[in-house]
Every structure is written in structure tokens, then in C-alpha cells.
Amino acid sequence: MLPDEITSTPSKPLVAICSQDAEVYLFLHHILDVDGFASTLASTREEMFDLADTANIRAWILDCHSGNGMAANCVRLRQDPRTGGLPIVALISQDAQDQHIALLKAGIDECFVRPMVPAKLLAYLRSRLGGPARSAAGLSLSYGAIEMELDTYHVRCSGEEVVLGPIEFKLLRHMLENPERVLSRDELIKTAWPRNVFVGPRTVDVHISRLRRCFRPFSRADMIRTVRLGGYALEDLSSARG
């Protein structure tokens, strides 16, 4: 759990992220911070209810995996007078979609199946918590047919929405910032993973493969070129629409 001094302010509402997945937490922490929200972590049920005593939580995000009991946690949050009236959002992994009905019965306010479009989660939180409105002219990156909006986490290829996981989003962002340049696996590791997490070259290859699959419906050609012994480079897809 993060330090107790993290609290809500009128301009930065505090959102509790209930997860045991470091990758999910770091991604959510980043997108919430960029969008004007503070966040804190609860990795156990005990930490969840400790937060109700020590921090002015404005909303809860539950990271739901198969068998992790988040529906029961939602019931407890709804029954607790300190948390019963707060927005509760479930992020449901692909292996836990059977929990959807149980979460609705438990009183969940909104569910998103991962991978999701981050902008939808942020828009929901702003609608409930009155967060800051986003500028229509946000920061963006583009190369060829690919567009990335950094403040809303939208990614498009030839105008069509592409849903990416958190690691794939970070990898693509670095490639868009360095188009056509060969990026080594070590450089990509430093870009997309926390410093205290060991990641080998093979893990990078796996996530690059996932990134390629995400764009496959929109392109006949491979958007990422493999450079033997070098790494990967982003190629122009503007003439490769399928």
C-alpha cells in the first residue's frame, strides 16, 4: 500500500486500486495520474478496509481474476457505511468473465473487460467524481497510419480503434517516439517494465508478437520489422491498409 499521506483533494480525487498484479497497478496509476486523479494500492482485503479508515477514498477499482473473490469484496464495500456509497468499478480479465453476474449482484457500478480502452474508464470516473475536463487538443503521436492520444490512451490505425495491453501501449509509444530507428531489446525493457522487475529478451519478443497481432486486422504488412541481433523498428503502415 502507498503512504497514508496520499489523500483526495478537490482537484485530485483519490482512487483505490485493488490488485495483486504489479503491471496492472502501475498502468492504472499512470493513466489516472495523467488524467488528474491520485491513486493508492490495496493488494489484500485487509489493506482495502484499512484504506477506508486512513484515506479519503473517492472510488474503488477492483482487478478481477478467476478465483480471487472480488465479488465478495464488493459486497463488503457496499455493506460498509464508510464505502457503501462510493463508485466501484471492476476490471475483468479474460479468464474471469463468468464473474460478471456475481459482480452485478454484489453491487458493482461498472464493469470493463480487459484489455480495455483506458479512455472509457477515465470518462466514467470523471462523470462520477467530477474530475478535470480534458482538452480537446491533447498530446498525440502519429506515424504512418498509426495515431496515439497520450492523454486519453486511444490508439487508432487507419482511423479504427486498436485496443492494447499496458506493456504493448508503452512499447508502441516508444516506437512512435523513435520511428524507423532500430530499438534494442534492452532499451525496450527499460521503456516498458519497472526497474525492479527482471525481464529477459524472450519476454520482449512475446509482447512484440502481441503488438503485431493487435494491428493485424488493420494491415496486410507487418508494422514492426525484426532486425537480426539488433532489435525492432517501426515501419510506415500508411499504404498497407487491408
Image (cartoon, rainbow, N blue to C red):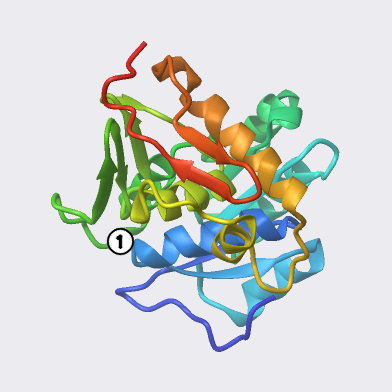
From the top left corner, tell me how far across and down residue 6 is, in percent.
52, 82
From the top left corner, tell me how far across and down residue 7 is, in percent.
49, 80
Is 193 on the left-hand or right-hand side of 87? right
**The furthest residue to the bottom:** 5
Is 151 on the left-hand or right-hand side of 105? left
Q: Quadrant of the N terminus?
A: bottom right
Q: What residue is pinned by disc 1?
A: 131
**The furthest residue to the front:** 228
Secondary structure of the residue carrying numbered label 1: loop
Query: Dot 1 surroundings within 10 Å: few (below 14), some, or many (20 or more)?
Result: some
From the top left corner, tell me how far across and down residue 60 is, in percent.
56, 56
From the top left corner, tell me how far across and down residue 72 is, in percent.
78, 45
Q: Residue at coordinates 67% horizontally, 35% vertically from top-left?
A: 103
Count up the numbered dots: 1
Q: Nearer the viewer, residue 42 or 101?
A: 42
Is residue 114 visible to the viewer in this orientation of the structure?
Answer: no
Q: Amino acid at mark 1?
A: Gly
Q: Residue at coordinates 65% horizontally, 73% vertically from top-left?
A: 51
Residue 134 vs 190, above or below: the answer is above
